[in-house]
Amino acid sequence: MVDGAPYQMISAPVLSPTLTGWIVFAARLDDREMRALERLSAIELDAQVFDRRGDAWLTTDQGPDSAVLAPFVAAAIQTGAAAPGHLKTAAGDDLVLVKPLKSLDGQASAALLLRYPMAAALAPYRPLMAAVVIVGLIGAALVAAASFGLSRGLSRPIIALDDAARRLQRGEDVHVAVQTDDEIGRLAGSFNLMAAEIRDREARITHLALHDAETGLHNRLALERAISARLATLAPGEQVVVATLGLDRFTFLRGAIGYSLATELVAEIGARVQAQDPRAVVARLTTSTLGVVSDLRDLAAALPLIETAAGSLEAPLRLGGELIDIHLTHGLGAGDATTDDAARLVEHALIALDQARATGRKVAAFDAVAYGDPAGNLSLMSEMLEGVASGALFLNHQPKLDLRSGAITGVEALVRWNHPTRGMLRPDLFVEMAEETGHIRALTECVLERAIADQQALFAAGHDVLMSINISGRLVDDLDFADRAIARIQATGARMCFEVTETAVIGNPEAALGVIARLAAAGIAISIDDYGSGLSSLAYLKQIRADELKIDKSFILTLDSDGKDALLVKSTIDLAHSLGMKVTAEGVENRESLGLLSLMGCDIAQGYHIAKPMPLAQLTAFLDAWSHPAITDEAQSA
Ligand code: C2E
Ligand code: CA
Ligand code: CA
């Protein structure tokens, strides 16, 4: 410090050759010197020199910040800080470095302060920062735009595929138009292929579901659909008419020409029907039955139409080099939506076909009355089984008169059913049904049980009669039934005759003949019932070892009026006798017939003229009263 102002000094010894003095150079550290120092710096420095006056640090360069800077210098000197520090001034944030200046006396009485404002330091980076921000923003925008575009490019085809898959699921015809060259494009290609395959397969399945595989004709389902469609569009008063065409003697025909030609035949007839009416739907319902629905709206118009068409439909057909005769039977069902549905109409037409065949007609319309109520029949059967258990089924007995002795030597047990709501039912109604529904065995076992009991009751009342029961044809080949019946009869010592209808034996000859032989060996009399009503054959008479031949009542009822019947009955009696059988005539309704039978040598007579079937109590009274019968006298005199 010289005169209170700081100087920078440098001294050098003057040697000649001994030290003669010092030379000292000094430069005042004033504002001008400071500006020169500032100019030397590459950055915009602000240099100031502070000097100590007592405890205070003063500067010559009294700026606005001196008040803040002086304490900073004092503090820096005190702590001896060598690194720059931060200082907040009015202008902003500054970087400040304080350096104590050496003095001649070694006391730090001056300090250099270098100040650099942060604002100035950062200024060059501002545009850079802005550029970075702008580039960043632009980059982010680009990334966003690119990913948006990319995702749209990716998701649009996927959405299209998803939509197509949904439509495919709904059964629509779909094709996705994605033509990109990437995985999605390939996926779309595969999808289209798959959709096409599904379409084809569906078409094939639909075709299979609606067509008969053998003939290519429509099937029942297709026919029912066509009927339903027509039912839906009927005007009031109109009907949908369904026709069935049955190929007669088909099994025989198939045996003769083979399966494949027979099928071809059915297809050919279908084609003929279609040619008659191109708008009709022709379907195969069973192997040998076709069903047809046309636009015909009136059953009455259908009958003459079928008759005129029959000629061309039945024209002989050349198949495999053979000319084949064709015979068709037709059934018709008709109805409207209020009463019928498609399935019912088809069923009616099929039943009508059966009805036509059963009655030997070429065409028949469904006859509901003749058909009855099959559902009711089934419930009738379960009721019958209950009746067997509860005793609602019982027996009436019809006496059998020995024409030589004039005695009642036997009775035929005929089943009766006192139905809880329907009243007394005739066996015709439920016996056949029991045969068809497999309940005949239970019924017959019940009848046998009661017949044995009734016979014992009669015996106890003093009447020893042969008890005849009817054995259905369906049961006569049932070995198990036969064994149980034999066991029951032998256990009770009953005297039984089994009346078997001849048709049954013919139906299953071998088993039935074996069973009959076993029954006969067990001491049960065998009677051939209804002889002459079925397909009687001499071979049958030869094979079966029966004790009795029962001439069917159809011959006896008209015996007195029809000369042919008389002839047939007479020769049958002779034939049976020569084969060692007794002859019973059933259906004897008057004294003339009884007389004729007696003359012809018939052994036993049964019929209303002698007695009607009657309950056990009445029968006992009847047998009691049967002494020296006037009827026998009558017969003998006739
Ligand atoms: P069927 O064995 O030929 O029995 C004789 C049928 O002719 C009886 O009818 C009887 O009432 C009737 N009949 C008797 N005399 C005369 C007559 O002089 N004139 C006329 N017109 N008819 C006469 P039913 O009792 O109605 O029996 C009908 C058929 O039912 C029987 O024919 C038999 O095949 C069957 N049936 C009856 N009971 C049984 C049974 O317990 N089991 C089996 N499997 N069938 C039975
Ligand atoms: Ca009988
Ligand atoms: Ca009979």
Image: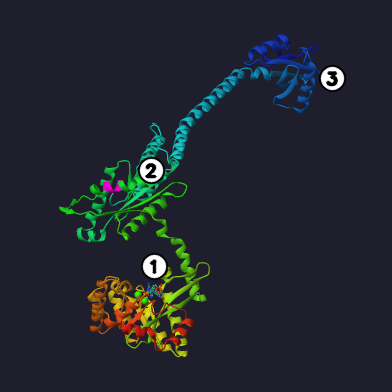
Q: Is residue 428 left or right of residue 83?
A: left
Q: Earlier in the sequence, mark 2 or mark 1?
A: 2
What residue is shown with label 1?
436
Image quarter in which the N terminus is found = top right
Tell me the kind of residue under disc 2: Arg
The answer to the question of whether label 2 and label 3 lie on touching residues, with beta carbons closer than 8 A, is no
Q: Compute the Cα span from label 3 to label 1.
A: 143 Å
- The residue identified by callout 3 is 54
> Who is closer to the viewer here, 505 or 131?
505
Camera-near label (3 vs 1) is: 1
Q: Which residues are magenta?
A: 305-309
Residue 380 seen from this side: yes
Q: CA distance from mark 2 to mark 3?
A: 136 Å
Disc 3 marks a residue whose amino acid type is Gly
Q: Ligand 1: which quarter?
A: bottom left
Mark 1 and mark 2 in contact (Cβ < 8 Å)? no
- Residue at disc 2, CB closer than 8 Å to ligand 1: no
Badge 1 amino acid? Glu
Q: Residues within 10 Å of mark 1 (few under 14, many from 20)?
A: few
Q: Residues within 10 Å of mark 3 (few under 14, many from 20)?
A: few
Give the x, y percent position of residue 186: 38, 36
* Picture disc at residue 297: 2
Query: Relative to 182, is 478 above or below?
Result: below
Left or right of 8? Residue 321 is left
Q: Position of residue 39 (x, y in %)?
A: 65, 12
Q: Is mark 1 within 8 Å of ligand 1?
A: no
Secondary structure mainly formed by the magenta segment: helix
Colour scheme of the picture:
rainbow
Which comes sooner in the sequence, label 3 or label 1? 3
Badge 2: residue crowd in 10 Å (few <14, some 14–19, many ≥20): many
Residue extending farthest to the left is 321
